Amino acid sequence: MTEAAKFVLGDKNAELQLRHGTIGPDVVDIASLYKNTGLFTYDPGFTSTASCESKITYIDGDEGVLLHRGYSIDQLAERGDFLETCYLLLYGELPTAHEKEDFVYRVTRHTMVHEQMSRFYTGFRRDAHPMAVMVGSVGALSAFYHDSTDITDPHQRMVASIRMIAKTPTLAAMAYKYHIGQPFVYPRNDLTYAENFLHMCFAVPCEPYHINATLAKAMDRIFILHADHEQNASTSTVRLAGSSGANPFACIAAGIACLWGPAHGGANEAALNMLGEIGTKDRIPEFIARAKDKNDPFRLMGFGHRVYKNYDPRAKIMQQTCHEVLDELGIRDDPLLEVAMELEHIALNDEYFVEKKLYPNVDFYSGITLKALGFPTEMFTVLFAVARTVGWIAQWNEMIEDPQQRIGRPRQLYTGAPRRDYLGIDQRG
Ligand code: SDX
């Protein structure tokens, strides 16, 4: 006997099935509500709405816990590496040594992009925001692989998935090189994923580029921290785009476009710009007051989260990584870090932030770390997109394989004009 919730409103009633997950809140299946009552539910921000069933990632917002296929983010970040996390997200299990070797081989040998792509970049202004270039270049991959992406064929879906994971770092590095007017650097098969990315971004033809193992490990860990995060705005965008049958490259381009917003992935760039605007510790109270002022649209970037009502576990690891990178580079007393740590201390003890459960999120310390690694602020969200590609593609695959999958088509509460007849222009006014 499955449990049901009884919905009664006047003469309208419906029995709505209750469904239980492995962990986390139960859900009330409302799919039959409109048919049985003529009513819609209304939840524009999806604050109480599950859009799908998933086995990939689980977040406990109150406890500040993030699990990928049941494994906690701190264990994955401390003991694994990014490509192992990619395998886990895609296939559902940690790889054996052989499985990992094969996966790394496959990803490594898909890192090159079609040579025509380099000409595609020359259409952009050099000062174009690299996220605009990423939306364009990833979407353009459809033109190179669209005819081989039969999304009903699991093999072709996995080839497309490997291609996306392998090629986004190359496209991102090309966007950076084009932005700064330096020549593109081809991927190298003898480097790890993170080493290869740093090499493609920072190597120049005039001298050898030396991989710093500590910085490469930090880069790899930053990729792990950003890999997937349940049904966030950009992942939901990818799922909705994919629900129409669009090819995966176009869907990932849609996800990149959504991630760009400052309320989402663009917050890392905005958070560093905010720390720069604050400048010194003595100006922090002024910005805290602005963040609390309902008449001021200013928000503390890198703070708050729809799900986390406790410390974002990724932010803790990011803060530790930030200190490791600054120590390795011999950067002492970074003024931005000083401001960030004081801002965090003040905010966490301010009743407004405590009452609203606003804590630092993954974007709060990432900007300082990425700046220290040598990236300009306009590249920060691009790096987030590189890492999140595996999460988007894993969720896209899961959606395509879901037997209940159908095109996403929300309804609405209409509050516009009632039906009325057309008036000729001489009858108006
Ligand atoms: C990411 O969803 C994900 O999982 C996203 C992500 C991922 O990995 O995919 O985790 C990545 O996007 C992290 C979030 C990055 N964004 C920022 O750091 C931007 C600043 N944060 C806010 O814009 C906000 O906290 C959001 C967008 C993150 C969450 O917004 P919600 O859930 O819609 O919350 P809300 O806007 O309704 O805020 C609740 C209250 C409001 O006050 P009241 O209207 O109730 O009086 O808290 C206040 C807000 O004004 N508030 C803030 C605040 N965030 C929320 N006040 C000041 N500063 C902030 N940062």
Image (cartoon, rainbow, N blue to C red):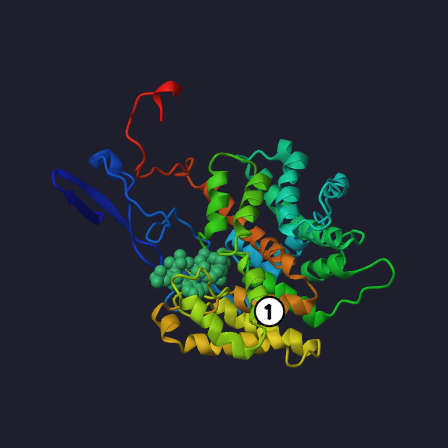
* Residue sitting at x 29%, y 26%: 419
Q: Is residue 49 left or right of residue 288?
A: left
Depth check, front residue: 39 or 395:
39
Q: Quadrant of ligand 1?
A: bottom left
Q: Disc 1 residue type?
A: Gly
* Residue sitting at x 58%, y 61%: 269
Q: Please provide percent x and percent y for residue 316.
A: 51, 72
Depth check, front residue: 165 or 333:
333
Looking at the rendered structure, the number of numbered marks drawn on it comes to 1
Residue 346 image-quadrant placement: bottom left
Depth check, front residue: 3 or 31:
31
Q: Which residue is mark 1?
A: 276
Residue 349 image-quadrant placement: bottom left
Q: Mark 1 Cα within 10 Å, few/some/many (few <14, many 20+)?
A: some
Label 1: state its secondary structure.
helix
* Residue sitting at x 66%, y 79%: 327
Q: Please provide percent x and percent y for residue 347.
A: 44, 74
Extreme residue in the bottom direction? 332
Image quarter where the C terminus lies is top left
Depth check, front residue: 422 or 365:
422
Vertically, is 333 above or below 127? below
Residue 214 image-quadrant placement: bottom right
Q: Is residue 192 left or right of residue 293?
A: right
